[in-house]
Amino acid sequence: MADETAPDGPDPGATEPVDVVATVGALDPTVLLLREFLHRSGALRTVAVVQLEDDTAVVDVGRLQPVEVTIGERTVQLPHALELDAAALLVPDVKQLPPFEVDPSTGEVSSPLGGLEHYARSVRDLAGILGEDNVAFVSWETSDPEVPISITARASDDGLLVTLGEEEFETEPGWPA
């Protein structure tokens, strides 16, 4: 007799186990680059969307989190502090700044003079290192823990997307000069 309380399939709330690996091959230099950028800038998270020959990879490096790499439908994790046997890519000039003061209701951001521009240039440079069709996304904490500030750049595009919490702001091409 069948158990009538048993579900008909897998639990929709359950998550698939993720494989833990010691390398992601050709993406190891990207992991090193994002991890070093995260540490130098004090970011909460750095993400790269990288076009491969026949697929797209997403490399996600969070503060104090395992590195997560998704290629197609497969996701793997690497321990955050794992030493990788790969040549490091040049890391853009970036410094850690104090959290920006933000007013989410007006979209106003106050930072040290030139702070937002510094982060914008460094994320644009990061996207350039990743390559023409690739995307860099970096998120930092602000004075409001619920409202991070993020910058997204594509090497082949001169504009940036600045996100404050849920609000998105496209910059003028070429900003900052």
Image: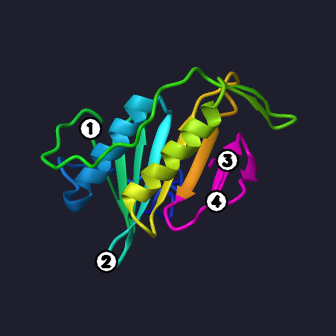
Image point (25%, 32%), residue name = 81
Residue wearing tag 4? 159
Q: Residue furthest bottom?
A: 54
- Can the viewer see residue 55 in this picture? yes
Residue wearing tag 2? 53
Q: Position of residue 115 (x, y in %)?
A: 61, 31
Image point (21%, 37%), residue name = 82
Label number found at residue 162: 3
Mark 2 and 3 residues: CB-CB less than 8 Å, in contact? no
Up-down relation of residue 37 to residue 26 (above or below): above
Residue wearing tag 1? 79
Q: Position of residue 91 (x, y in %)?
A: 34, 43
Q: Secondary structure at mark 4?
A: loop
**CA distance separating discs 2 and 1:** 26 Å
User: From the viewer's perspective, is 171 left or right of 126?
Assistant: right
Badge 2 or badge 3: first in the primary sequence: 2
Residue segment shown in magenta: 154-177
- Identified by mark 4, the residue type is Gly
- Identified by mark 3, the residue type is Val
Badge 4 or badge 2: first in the primary sequence: 2
Q: Nearer the viewer, residue 97 or 12?
A: 97
